[in-house]
Amino acid sequence: MRYAVRAVKYFIQVSITMALILGILMALGLVSTDVNVAFQQGWRSIGIIAILFGVVSGIYPLFGYSKRTVNANGEPAGHRSAIIGTMESRGYTLEKEADDGAMSFRLRSIAARIFRFWEDRVSISPVLGGFTVEGLTRDITRIAGNLEFKLRDND
């Protein structure tokens, strides 16, 4: 279910972005405001573009969201403050914490949350030998690198 919701959100985001770009081009007079002139096949082209956006949006969650493992020695509870400090420096705030040590973070910036269609959650769960970080791939790559550096210094 989460996959489908992410795909729909991405479709909406891409469609709005394309509409804004076309609107600006039309407002500046760089593109005709008549759809039949702006696109070679008129309204049929818009349908084809929507189908293309749908296909890309259906595939994107496979690559846009991921899990990474961060290696850490010692007890997970001992790394709690380092994790929270690292996440706060990246603009995240602790949303909730489970009894097993799993933590969920959200972006502090309302504007960033809106632009990401509220797909800004990063989850960090303790596993044997470290932590699993889950969320947007572009964020997870940076966060995992920062956490590995911090947790190595923490050891």
Image: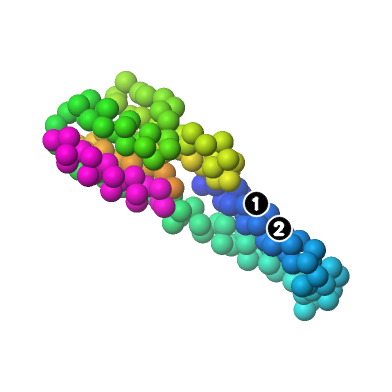
- x, y (%) of residue 62? 45, 55
Give the residue furthest to the front.
28
Q: Is residue 84 visible?
A: yes
- x, y (%) of residue 113? 55, 40
Q: Is residue 42 visible?
A: no
Q: Amino acid at mark 1?
A: Ile
Residues in magenta?
Answer: 137-155
Query: Is 105 positioned to the left or the right of 15 in the image?
Result: left
Does residue 123 lie above or below 140 as drawn? Answer: above
Q: Amino acid at mark 2?
A: Leu
SS of the residue at dot 1? helix
Q: Quadrant of residue 149?
A: top left
Location of the C terminus by quadrant is top left
Q: Quadrant of residue 42?
A: bottom right
The secondary structure that dominates the magenta segment is: helix
Q: Earlier in the sequence, mark 1 or mark 2?
A: 1
User: Residue drawn at (74%, 62%), measured in percent from left and top?
Assistant: 24
Quickly name the residue at label 1.
12
Give the residue furthest to the top.
99
Is residue 144 in the magenta section? yes
Query: Is 101 positioned to the left or the right of 50 in the image?
Result: left
- x, y (%) of residue 134? 37, 42
Query: Is 117 positioned to the left or the right of 142 in the image?
Result: right
Does residue 48 lie above or below 105 as drawn? Answer: below
Quickly name the residue at label 2.
20
Query: Is 80 positioned to the left or the right of 104 in the image?
Result: left
- x, y (%) of residue 31? 78, 72
User: Residue drawn at (59%, 62%), measured in percent from left and top?
Assistant: 55
Circle count: 2
Is residue 132 in the magenta section? no
